[in-house]
Amino acid sequence: MFKKIAASAIALTAVTAAPLFALDAATTTELNLREGPGPQYGVVSVMPQDAMVSVDGCTASDWCKVSFDGAEGWAYSPYLLNTTMPEPTVIYQNTDAMDVKIIEQEKDGTETAVNATAGAGFGAATAALLVGGPAAVAAGVVLGAAGGAAATPAETTVTYVSQNPVEPVYLNGEVVVGAGIPDGVTLYDVPEADYTYAYVNDAPVIVNPENRRIVYIVR
């Protein structure tokens, strides 16, 4: 499993001044607040669905710097709705229209060295996004509990998944309920259960084998 990268290993610089105020946004699903802009960074906390956050700015890719409940961190923009607009709009791929402050990443030698060691396994397997993630959300399909994807597996199933780790697979994007697992990723059976499971980005996830969608994240 990859070693989590400390947020202090990366310098972030705002390259535009607008807007002068933070945007208000809401999470469309239970969403990780991470130490840095990427799934390889450690989780600070887990924000509930419909949580209100303040967005300070976003990288040119998919991650936004946010504040939630007194804590600062980074969240995956496909699951953030800008609530300051006449109609709530997903921030992903809409930063220009929203005048979101763009935060540029400046990597130093220390971070490069850390990435070479800790991020090697992650970087080698990030070609595939979680199916149904950013593209579906940008098209207006909100994943997660509100979309009926969530489930509460039996405690025996959760215990089995926790106690029987498998080789992790690393994918771009964020692990959320409702996201799909690409066809090339192996799903493992759970004895006497209708679910399968995998370890995605080091997170144990329980999956509906019929549509390969995550129904539960073991935390």
Image: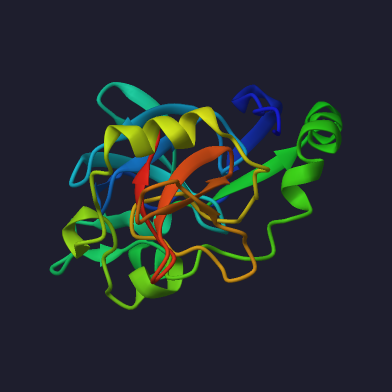
Residue 219 appears in the rendering? no
Where does residue 146 sit, x and y in percent of width and height?
Answer: 17, 58
Q: Is residue 186 left or right of residue 84?
A: right
At 72% from the left edge and 40% from the top edge, which residue is drawn?
106
At 34% from the left edge and 46% from the top edge, which residue is drawn?
216
Q: Is residue 203 left or right of residue 154?
A: right
Residue 174 appears in the rendering? yes
Q: Quadrant of the N terminus?
A: top right
* Nearer to me, 186 or 33: 186
At 47% from the left edge and 30% from the top edge, which residue is drawn?
162
At 23% from the left edge and 38% from the top edge, which residue is drawn?
48
Q: Quadrant of the C terminus?
A: top left
Splitting the image into 4 quarters, where does residue 207 fall?
Answer: bottom left
Splitting the image into 4 quarters, where does residue 211 fall?
Answer: bottom left
Q: Is residue 184 left or right of residue 140?
A: right
Where does residue 112 sit, x and y in percent of width and height?
Answer: 83, 36
Where does residue 197 sit, x and y in percent of width and height?
Answer: 48, 49
Q: Which residue is the extreme one toward the front?
A: 192
* Nearer to me, 73 or 178: 178
